Image (spheres, rainbow, N blue to C red):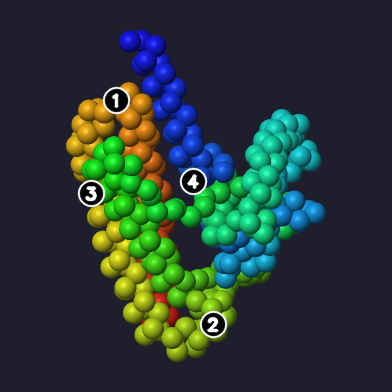
């Protein structure tokens, strides 16, 4: 009996690794100051693996690599940074292999969560997330299968909201004065003059932002409810054979991981919408 339990635990652990691996090529970290999220395609050339950005603010390509200075004048900090850069380089080697094996040596629709440093044209990735694929029903737990499909539908809606949010993006430019100098872009990455360009598209921008705000609010409610039947799912899984239980609990773990990912995405989108709405309110008062 004990041997069966051990085997089942090993199988569960292995399947969790297989299922969670496509979501992230790097370990997840908490959001912190200086962290950016950039979308684009991962590619490889003689310089290494890089992200070809589709972001209006972070245009161009950024190589993945360690960006922390190892010559700060402080031996302790240098040692810590060297260790962090080495760790990043080790993880990136695996990414290069993954991208090299992809069709046309390209992984499309990737999102990098990372930070910039002293190496110009480089970004140090904390997490690289690929697209979520439509789940395949296992039949082991009908409730779990339905839940996974519901989560996937929420993911598709999240991607639609991301598209809406691109109606207005902005970045801080270098400024010698006390006031922050901002540059604004429309969905086609065309720069909008401030304030006349923003005022000219004010009605359209505010309408799209209202749509996005309504959609993300509905998404957040749905995301919170999507695993309300977790108890029913576990009950169905426990009624199966040990091997089927391993597969069933792995599917449940996948559902939980997907739910967490979509929740964080929607919270970030909600913050972006609020910021954009605040800018438009300010522009209308000018």
**Between 257 and 200, which is closer to the camera in this rendering?**
257
* Residue depth check, mark 2 versus mark 1: number of the one nearer the observer: 1
Verify CB contact (< 8 Å) between mark 2 and mark 4: no
Q: Residues within 10 Å of mark 4 (few under 14, many from 20)?
A: some
Q: Which residue is mark 2?
A: 192
Q: Residue at x 67, y 59 (%)?
A: 104
Q: Is residue 184 above or below residue 243?
A: below
Identify which residue, 178 or 68, lies in the foreground.
68
State the residue at coordinates (24%, 37%): 233
Q: Between tags 2 and 4, which lies in front?
A: 4
Which residue is drawn at the image coordinates 38% and 66% (left, top)?
A: 161
The answer to which quarter of the image holds residue 108 is bottom right
User: Residue placed at 68% from the left, 62% from the top?
Assistant: 61
Q: Earlier in the sequence, mark 3 or mark 2?
A: 2
Q: Residues within 10 Å of mark 2 (few under 14, many from 20)?
A: some
Q: In the rendered view, does 50 fall on the left or right side of 209?
A: right
Locate residue 201, reporting x and y percent: 43, 86
Q: Which residue is mark 1?
A: 241
The residue identified by callout 4 is 23
In the drawing, does residue 83 fall left or right of residue 141? Answer: right
Work out how far the residue at label 2 is from the one at label 4, CA to CA, in angstroms. Answer: 35 Å
Find disc 3 in the rendering and name its residue. 225
C-beta proximity under 8 Å, tags 4 and 1: no
């Amino acid at each position: 009996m004990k041997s069966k339990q051990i085997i089942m635990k090993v199988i569960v652990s292995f399947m969790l690794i297989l299922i969670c691996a496509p979501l992230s090529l790097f370990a997840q970290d908490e959001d912190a100051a200086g962290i950016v999220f950039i979308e684009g395609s991962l590619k490889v050339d003689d310089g290494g693996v890089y992200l070809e950005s589709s972001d209006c603010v972070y245009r161009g390509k950024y190589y993945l690599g360690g960006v922390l200075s190892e010559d700060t004048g402080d031996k302790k900090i240098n040692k810590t940074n060297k260790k962090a850069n080495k760790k990043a380089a080790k993880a990136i080697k695996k990414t290069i292999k993954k991208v090299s094996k992809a069709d046309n040596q390209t992984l499309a629709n990737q999102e990098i969560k990372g930070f910039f440093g002293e190496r110009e044209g480089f970004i140090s990735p904390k997490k690289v997330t690929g697209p979520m694929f439509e789940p395949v029903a296992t039949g082991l737990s009908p409730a779990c299968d339905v839940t996974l499909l519901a989560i996937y539908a929420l993911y598709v809606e999240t991607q639609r909201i991301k598209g809406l949010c691109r109606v207005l993006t902005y970045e801080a430019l270098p400024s010698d004065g006390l006031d922050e100098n901002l540059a604004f872009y429309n969905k086609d990455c065309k720069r909008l003059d401030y304030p006349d360009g923003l005022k000219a598209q004010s009605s359209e921008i505010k309408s799209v932002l209202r749509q996005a705000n309504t959609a993300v609010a509905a998404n957040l409610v749905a995301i919170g409810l999507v695993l309300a039947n977790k108890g029913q799912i576990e009950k169905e899984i426990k009624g199966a054979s040990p091997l089927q239980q391993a597969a069933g609990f792995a599917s449940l773990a996948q559902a939980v991981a997907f739910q967490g990912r979509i929740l964080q995405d929607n919270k970030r989108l909600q913050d972006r919408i609020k910021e954009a709405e605040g800018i438009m309110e300010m522009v209308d008062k000018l």
